[in-house]
Image: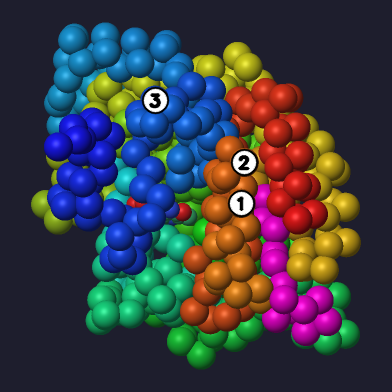
Amino acid sequence: MSQKTSQETLYEKDEQYMWHHLKPYQKDQNPMVIDSAKGAWITDIEGNSYLDGMSGLWCVNAGYGREEMVEAASEQLQQMPFHPLSNSHIPGIQLAEKLNQWLRDDYRIFFSNSGSEANETAFKIARQYHHQNGEPQRYKFISRYRAYHGNTLGALAATGQAQRKFRYEPLAPGFIHVHAPDEYHLPSGQSFEAWSLECARMMEDTIKWERPETVAAVIMEPIITGGGVLIPHPSYVKEVEKICKKYGLLLINDEVICGFGRTGENFGYQNYGIEPDIVTMAKGITSGYLPLAATAVKQELYEPFKGEEESDHFRQVNTFGGNPAACKLAIKNMEIMEEENLVARSKALGKKIMEDIQPLEDHPNVGNIRQMGLLFGIELVANKETKEPISNEAIGNMIAECKSRGLIVGKNADTVAGHSNTLTLAPPLSITDEDAEMIVRTLKEVFHE
Ligand code: PMP
């Protein structure tokens, strides 16, 4: 009887015991069990290496194998591995200060563990803020179709992707969706700017129909990422900020993907010169090395929480939120990004890669390529005239072709609405010039086939 290899055993146990995230149940013909990683590259248990063009799940911004980050966390684990943030600890204080430097404004920081929790925290703070500010009826949130804000029942309610909600409803009430402008799918004869302003106007209308005094906040990613990398016209973002101010709504910016240099600025909203009331972040805060998330709240919003009543404070505990080792690691992650100028590199290298792949727009199946920093969306169409999206099977084949050449790319989640099918690319900000060339070369090869 032939002896099973240790790899075969692992695949079998994976098949038997693991409940994979977001994957349909069918025996995986090409299971991938990752064993090690360095720089922008990941290696599986069979020794195959891939350039991780998705930074894991849009998070390994500083790249893999950063020993200084591991040491920082390890030292902290030895010194003091856990204490709840009802008290405080040094790495938490230091990270909160550092985040303020990156935010370039004065925010108070509530730590949690994931992007979903950071958004849930933002919703609760927004509602309680209004409550204690004499407007207890403000409970609704405006969010946008196609955006993803998390997997918990509130964050999923904010999410604008129907296929992720189906069979889990009813979700938290009070979330109202509006259209986000999409540069590639414009009503005929409209310019992108005019349509963007029209979308903002429709958002304002929605707020008015809902009665502004019942609406707590707008939540938006500066750039819708998982929903297809939709880069907004600058005037839209400014207009949304203006509408929030006009009706007394808070503006929550979900920076879970856009933060930490992904778009060529510290945070995505900084590309647009707005000042969000609340900023949520996760993923790139530790480059994915440990779970950590934060909800940054403008200092002035904290005022009502200083009340004398027992119920005036924010009554939320999060056991693992702001784990000291995760905070220490996050500080080192941000220091590395500063030392290596990774945010500026994201801007410059993103532009260079875009110049190199832009000619692919001549390909009959490439509708539109969108880029900001090291964040790319390549929208694929079956027909350039009608902009009908390429089939799921065809995009699956393209992803497989990239993988067979050693490049991992992703795709947007908006397949049920049939709106678009977009290849996504978000490599570590630390990629070398050779890595960048490999990405360009591979995409060209795959499209030319
Ligand atoms: N917001 C955005 C924009 C995200 O992309 C994600 C995760 N992909 C989340 C929130 C939720 O983050 P998590 O998976 O850490 O809960």
Disc ID at residue 176: none
Q: Which residue is mark 2?
A: 405
Label 1 SS: helix
Residue assigned mark 1: 401
Does the beta carbon at disc 1 come under 8 Å from ligand 1?
no
Can the viewer see residue 426 in this picture? no
Q: Mark 3 belongs to which amino acid? A: Ser
Residue 24: x and y in percent read 33, 66
Few, some or many residues within 10 Å of mark 1 (<14, 14–19, 20+): some
The label nearer to you, 1 versus 3, is 1
What residue would you read off at disc 3?
A: 36
Q: Which residues are magenta?
A: 376-388
Q: Quadrant of residue 223?
A: bottom right
Circle 1: residue type: Glu
Expressed as whole percent of the image width and height from the top left, the position of residue 298 reads: 46, 45
Is most of the magenta stretch helix, strand or loop?
Answer: strand
Could you say where residue 172 lies in the image, as x and y percent from the top left? 27, 74
